[in-house]
Amino acid sequence: MDKSFEPGQIESKWYAAWEASGDFKPSGQGEPYCILLPPPNVTGTLHMGHAFQQTVMDMLIRYQRMRGMNTLWQVGTDHAGIATQKIVENQLALDDKTRHDLGREAFVERVWKWKEESGSTITNQMRRIGAAADWSRERFTMDEGLSEAVRKVFVEWFRAGLIYRGNRLVNWDPLLGTAVSDLEVNNVERDGHMWSIRYPTADGKDSVVVATTRPETMLGDVAVAVNPEDERYTHLIGKTLRLPLSGREIPVIADDYVDREFGTGFVKITPAHDFNDYAIGQRHQLAPINIFTLDAKVNENAPEKYRGMDRYEARKAVLADLEAEGLLVETKPHKLQVPVSQRSDAVIEPMLTDQWFLDLTSEKGRKEITEPALEAVRGGEIKFVPENWSTTYTQWLENIQDWCISRQLWWGHRIPAWYDEAGNIFVGEDEADARAHASTTPVGALRQDDDVLDTWFSSALWPFSTLGWPMDGPVKDEHGNVVADWSNDNVFLPSAVLVTGFDIIFFWVARMVMATKYFTGRVPFRHVYINAIVRDAEGQKMSKSKGNTLDPLDLIDGIELEPLVAKSTKSLLIPQVRDKVEKRIRKDYPTGIPAIGTDALRFTFAALASYSRTINFDIKRAEGYKAFCNKLWNAARFVLMNLPEGQLPAPGGAPVTEAERWILTRLKQTLTDVEQHFASYRFDLLAQELYEFTWNEFCDWFLELSKPALNGDDAAAAASTRHTLVVVLETILRALHPIVPFISEEIWHSVAPKLGLDAKFLLERPWPKAEEIVADDAATAEIEWFKNVLSGIRRIRAEMNIAPGKTIPLLLADGDASDRARAAKFAAQISFLARVDAPQWIESGADEPAAAAAVVGSMRVLIPLAGLIDLGAEKTRLAKEIGRIEVEIKKCEGKLGNANFVANAPAEVVAQERQRIADWGVQLTALREQAQKLG
């Protein structure tokens, strides 16, 4: 092994070897275990959320493969309809062209060309994270096999009466010219105004005042609503108002939706341009009036004066005319939540358009799609981790609306529907199929629908379409390679666990359950692990405009300051924002970002992966896990340097020394705990267990405790210790491999020959089984005593600034017969490791010299002060230690004084707290006596 750990030199070497070996493919043996990668957008690049999520998935896949499971990590990318189309349209704009200049067919060809050239960026970056994914089965939501699945699903749902076309209100992006999902809309707080406008009654005898933040939409008002319980206005219900500027008469209606405490208690109703108003309009059978064109200009349904105006231009004109007529009562500042398109930054306009919908709300839709998806979670077929997210899932499904599945784009799965010249609709997997299933003879030629399906539609089929459904035989890619075969691969459905974010429980998780249950009769996955959202070290949301985003590859490889500044500011167009971000970057990273390597980044993610909703990522913590990697590397070098050439001979029997039996006992407990944490998805706890065992017990203690045997005259103890060192190290590497695959692989290839292991890679080794390790509680008790003695001596040395190499006297006092036996047994090791003279006992009643003390049970460990220690400093140290123990006792007493704790905590936990008080009390008494002796 090299003298120092250099991650950059080993990562690319091992990943290429793993992938080439085929070790990421299903083995075909063992129980199926599948994880579905949430397909990232083909336009995307790896961000911190991806890296965190993929680390979790990779840990699970590597762990389960080593446990003998037939693992499949199914990967692929999403065609990302809007995002991908926008990238190519932006490229065309550089040549002053639009997609319409090319035409649909040529434009789609151009998008495919872009995908082939640039669409593999994120999958290459996943390899840098160490993803043990089966790349030979990589899918793309627009590839032919998945496209066939999409067409079949659409046609079957349509023929079952579950897909329909209707005129409904949708989120409309007037810049992109398409409907968008709620997930593609950001609600942004902006400064706006609340305008109060007077609406006179039709008879001119009275008036009402309504408040609105969008006065231009009054041109489409069809009613004014009040709460039926609002006694102020019951006399107006049923009367008509004259709509200002339009002259139309509109009714005053009563509806429980109106909050009588908000504003004036009157609400204008514009069903064509507000979702709440649309629902009210349906309840009261009010015909909506659409006043905007698809590019958000006023249309012919408004008074002629405003036609052709942009919506914000129309706002100014409407306000000016209202003021001129004396109908503008009040204008005041108001904070608004404005819906903004993620893709274009345009303000979303609720718009009535003809769209395709999946029925989820009628009696039939609920019975066949919605209710089975609800029952899958209620009945326990699918479990959420943490469990509370199941409530989010069920609440959404209980209040679900029909799903708008169409988009007005060119890139995507074109809707398999055709229209004849009379406007009749014909649906089929292709035109011939549509004609074959026609109930009437088409009139003239057929024209295919121009719309495409919502990207989430194809994503909803991901759990079974990627496995080859609905094809009868093998599915091949464009190169002729088999990527799926439903007849064999359906064993991976349901998959074991879906790792995803809470923000797409509605848009993806629920829809996968709906589609998979309907078409296969199975659930898509057994568990849904909802991972936390990654934030910066201060808990702030990561944002380019804040300058607090981190590129995972910059953490892995490192980046100097100037390239980091350039990278962080290049896409920021507003000078003030760019300057603010540059200032923050230079302050936070004055010398750039040091390289920490993939393993340290992965360990950081694992250590942060609790059940919390968010996690705060701090580079300093990542640097701490790089130190862990260095510690492991150096420990391995120590072990290897103390071994003879060649393979070690097999041991003749049980481990000779108590130190060996102690480390094996601790290893057994660690592996038991780690398996429990894997089962409960507590990656933070399993990372902590492995860190504590590796750093503290193996590197700090066992390597130290092995030295007397390695350097002693007992050949059997030396040989046994060498073997145990290697066995424990190799076991640690296997246990750590799911978290830190690169360093564990590199070290393992130096260790494996010593044990005669011939596996090609660490992933081919079995997961270490705790039950195969023999525990020795007696040896553990002996070594824990020994460790406490050494720790006490070392603490005194450190706090009193006694030179580490100076040999000092050691006295022991009090204690019982077991302490005396142990002191005699470990005398040589204590002297060797603690750099002390052979320990001497002070008999009861004998005079004691002034000394610094540590307490182990009822025994005092004494370092005489004469010539070594400042008496005043030792009194201060004792007072500090007494204070610390008093705090610990108060903590225990607080727990035991809590009736709820005593009543509800497991009996062994309560007993443990009582024992801790007793142990602390013994130590406190001894320390107080020692302090008293010092005067």
Image: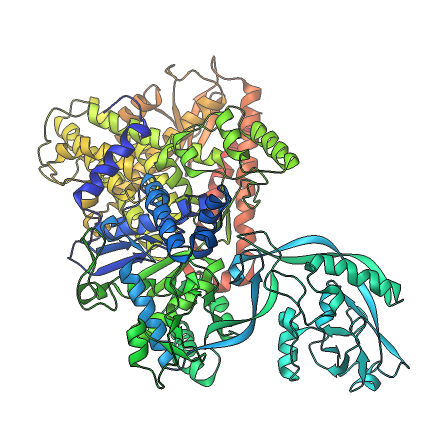
Q: Quadrant of residue 304?
A: bottom right
Left or right position of 88 against 497: right
Quarter occupied by the N terminus? top left
Q: Residue at x 25, y 62 (%)?
A: 467
Left or right position of 770 against 558: left
Q: Is residue 660 visible?
A: no
- Coloration of the structure image: rainbow
Left or right position of 921 against 239: left
Q: Residue at x 22, y 60 (%)?
A: 32
As drawn, 456 above or below 724: below
Q: Position of residue 297 (x, y in %)?
A: 65, 61
In this rendered view, identify the residue nearer to me: 748 or 230.
Answer: 230
Q: Is residue 284 visible?
A: yes
In this rendered view, identify the residue nearer to me: 509 or 802.
Answer: 509
Q: Quadrant of residue 471?
A: bottom left
Quarter occupied by the C terminus? top right
Q: Position of residue 53 (x, y in %)?
A: 40, 49
Q: Position of residue 491 (x, y in %)?
A: 22, 65
As drawn, 929 above or below 174: above
The number of numbered discs placed on residues in the rendered structure image is: 0
Left or right position of 871 against 906: right
In this rendered view, identify the residue nearer to me: 304 or 844.
Answer: 304
Name the residue furthest front: 444
Q: Position of residue 908 (x, y in %)?
A: 40, 57
Q: Residue at x 22, y 42 (%)?
A: 19
As drawn, 733 above or below 451: above
